[in-house]
Image: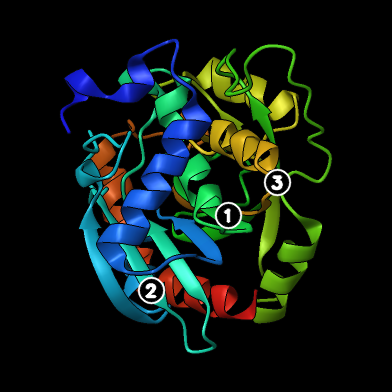
């Protein structure tokens, strides 16, 4: 499917119907009727897909209704169905659409809505992000305890009121800490991107309660809550944010930090997922 004929671009289309069609595509292409857990793997987290269990099927995301080709290096553009050692069916999403790509919020959250439509009750959202909290160092995983949505947008349409209390499940965070008691928690701020934040914006994020800055996750988490899913969020600190570190920021730095940390954090995520 090309981006030109994506059904989500029709303003009259029902995004939940398209998600159900995508779930049916996944069932047909993988041979797996339902999934229990879904993982969206951001920068630095990709190798976790090789550790959570046995891959049953790998599907190009563009063969599934509503999905777009990823615009960012480090995102693989596939959907994988994995069978965990304990018998859980896990849907691994390597095809994240970022808000800054300009395709609209429906496409940003389509993967989450599709995961819910496959039957997944738990959504694990991961990302690579900048550290505002000066105690964070590159390569460190941080549990997301809450978020501040600075995109000035929402995946909810019309008079749809959804409670976001305990959006990032306290229960799931406690499960994660049984695997690694050293995990810290932080508040994630989603900016629009694609430019990195200015030092003044980073200071603002800290003043309003943010510990981490990035360009994904918050909108997806809102959609996951609307769909009734329980959410676990994890950020890999790939760099200190602008003004916290002295050197200029670059996407290459993000990728390099992700590559360096990948073996450790992927093993951590695999063990956490098995415990969920």
Q: Earlier in the sequence, mark 1 or mark 3?
A: 1
Q: Which of 113 and 31 is in front in this view?
A: 31
Q: Give coordinates of residue 262: x percent, y percent.
A: 35, 67
Vertically, is 192 above or below 138?
above
Question: Mark 2 or mark 3, which is nearer the start of the sequence?
Answer: 2
Q: How far apart are marks 3 and 2 (CA)?
A: 22 Å
Q: Which residue is drawn at 57% across and 24% down?
A: 155
Question: Mark 1 — residue?
Answer: 123
Horizontal side of residue 17 vs 56, given as left or right: right
Q: Which of 56 and 149 is in front in this view?
A: 56
User: Which label sits in the foreground, 1 or 3?
Assistant: 3
- From the viewer's perspective, is 231 left or right of 193? right
Residue at point 43%, 30% (across, down): 108
Q: How far apart are marks 2 and 1 (CA)?
A: 15 Å
Look at mark 2 in the image and give the residue it sits on. Answer: 82
Q: Which residue is at 44% across, 18% downward?
A: 13
Q: Quadrant of residue 184?
A: bottom right
Left or right? Give the position of 148 relative to 244.
right
Image quarter (top left, top right, bottom left or bottom right) of the C terminus: bottom right
- Give the quadrant of residue 65: top left
What count of labels does the image hold? 3
Q: Earlier in the sequence, mark 2 or mark 1?
A: 2
How far from the left and from the top, in percent, is residue 265?
45, 69
Q: Is mark 3 on a helix, strand or loop?
A: loop
Q: Residue 167: name its quadrant.
A: top right
Q: Give the residue number, with chain letter if any, for mark 3.
A: 228
Q: Which of 224 and 7 is in front in this view?
A: 7
Mark 2 element type? strand
252 vs 60: above or below: above
């Amino acid at each position: 499917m090309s981006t030109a004929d994506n059904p989500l671009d029709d303003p009259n289309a029902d995004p939940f119907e398209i998600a159900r069609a995508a779930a049916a595509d996944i069932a047909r292409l993988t041979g797996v009727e339902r999934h229990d857990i879904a993982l969206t793997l951001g920068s630095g987290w990709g190798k976790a897909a090789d550790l959570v269990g046995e891959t049953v099927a790998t599907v190009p995301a563009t063969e599934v209704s509503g999905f777009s080709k990823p615009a960012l290096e480090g995102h693989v553009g596939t959907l994988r169905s994995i069978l965990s050692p304990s018998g859980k069916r896990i849907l691994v999403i390597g095809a994240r659409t970022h808000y800054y790509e300009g395709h609209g919020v429906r496409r940003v959250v389509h993967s989450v809505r599709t995961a819910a439509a496959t039957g997944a009750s738990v959504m694990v959202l991961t990302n690579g992000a900048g550290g505002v909290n000066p105690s964070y160092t590159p390569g460190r995983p941080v549990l997301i305890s809450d978020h501040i949505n600075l995109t000035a947008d929402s995946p909810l349409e019309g008079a749809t009121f959804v409670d976001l209390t305990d959006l990032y499940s306290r229960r799931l965070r406690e499960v994660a800490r049984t695997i690694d008691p050293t995990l810290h928690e932080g508040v994630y701020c989603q900016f629009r991107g694609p430019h990195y934040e200015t030092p003044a914006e980073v200071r603002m994020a800290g003043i309003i309660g943010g510990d981490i800055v990035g360009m994904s996750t918050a909108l997806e988490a809102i959609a996951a809550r609307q769909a009734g899913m329980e959410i676990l969020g994890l950020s890999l600190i790939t760099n200190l944010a602008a003004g916290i570190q002295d050197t200029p920021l670059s996407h290459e730095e993000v990728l390099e930090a992700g590559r360096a940390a990948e073996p450790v954090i992927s093993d951590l995520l695999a063990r956490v997922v098995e415990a969920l």
